[in-house]
Image: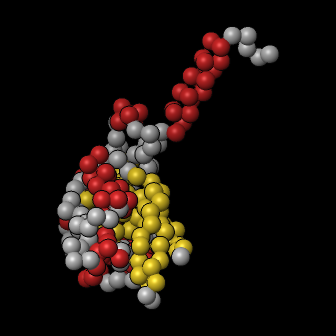
Amino acid sequence: MFCQSPAPMIFVYWILFVYIQYNIMIEHICAWCGKKLTSQENLESTHYRISHGICEECKDIHFHANRESLNEFLDRIDAPVFVMDESGQFISANKKGLFAAQKTLEEVEGSLEGEVFECVYADQPDGCGNTRHCNGCIIRRTILDTFKTGESNLFVPVTIDKMIDGTLVKQMYTISTEKSGNLVLLRIDTPGSAQ
């Protein structure tokens, strides 16, 4: 037998845990200027951080300098991405996001998630965010969680009830969120449907 008492095994497991934790931590840096975005203490307090983000200075330059640079930035992302403000409204999207939602930028701007993704409940008289179904909306809860905590949410499975050609269809996605200042970037992946 390798170990005669549980104490050495506990120590082995602890060493393995520390090793895994140390190797999982990813330095979070600005993709534009290379500035470190999180201190080592912040990295240790979170279970996962993506490797690149955007610092406040670069966000101000690229997101607020003019509307064109935000859209140009978003179009460089090779996935459907939407940008939301603190009120929960979409303020922009990249071309892949617009294609996935089958919407124009004008249709997306100022809209809520149920309106953009054509949730069947968004068409009810109370509208998106105000029906009894909205409290359980994973998209809404994930976005609000990212606004509240500042933590990224990665590959969260969601289902949207949609009406397609008179048939109720469950559209399935995974979403990821990342907070930058007072904005949240919402990424949509793996569209599929089940009836």
Q: Nearer the viewer, residue 81 or 191?
A: 191
- Image quadrant where residue 139 sits: bottom left
Whether residue 87 appears in this view of the structure is yes
- Residue that appears at 73% across and 14% down: 3
- Compared to residue 195, the image places residue 140 above or below, namely above
Q: From the image, which quarter does the N terminus lie in? A: top right
Q: Residue 26, image x and y in percent?
A: 47, 42
Residue 74 falls left or right of residue 169: left
Residue most extreme to the bottom: 165
Q: Residue 153, image x and y in percent?
A: 40, 52
- Compared to residue 157, the image places residue 102 above or below, namely below
Whether residue 108 appears in this view of the structure is no
Q: Residue 128, image x and y in percent?
A: 26, 71
Q: How many marks?
A: 0
Q: Nearer the viewer, residue 20 or 162?
A: 162
- Image quadrant where residue 176 sits: bottom left
- Residue that appears at 23% across and 74% down: 127
Q: Residue 138, image x and y in percent?
A: 38, 59
Residue 189 falls left or right of residue 105: right
- Residue that appears at 26% across and 77% down: 124
Residue 36 falls left or right of residue 7: left
- Residue that appears at 29% across and 45% down: 149
The colour scheme applied to this rendered structure is: secondary structure
Residue most extreme to the right: 1
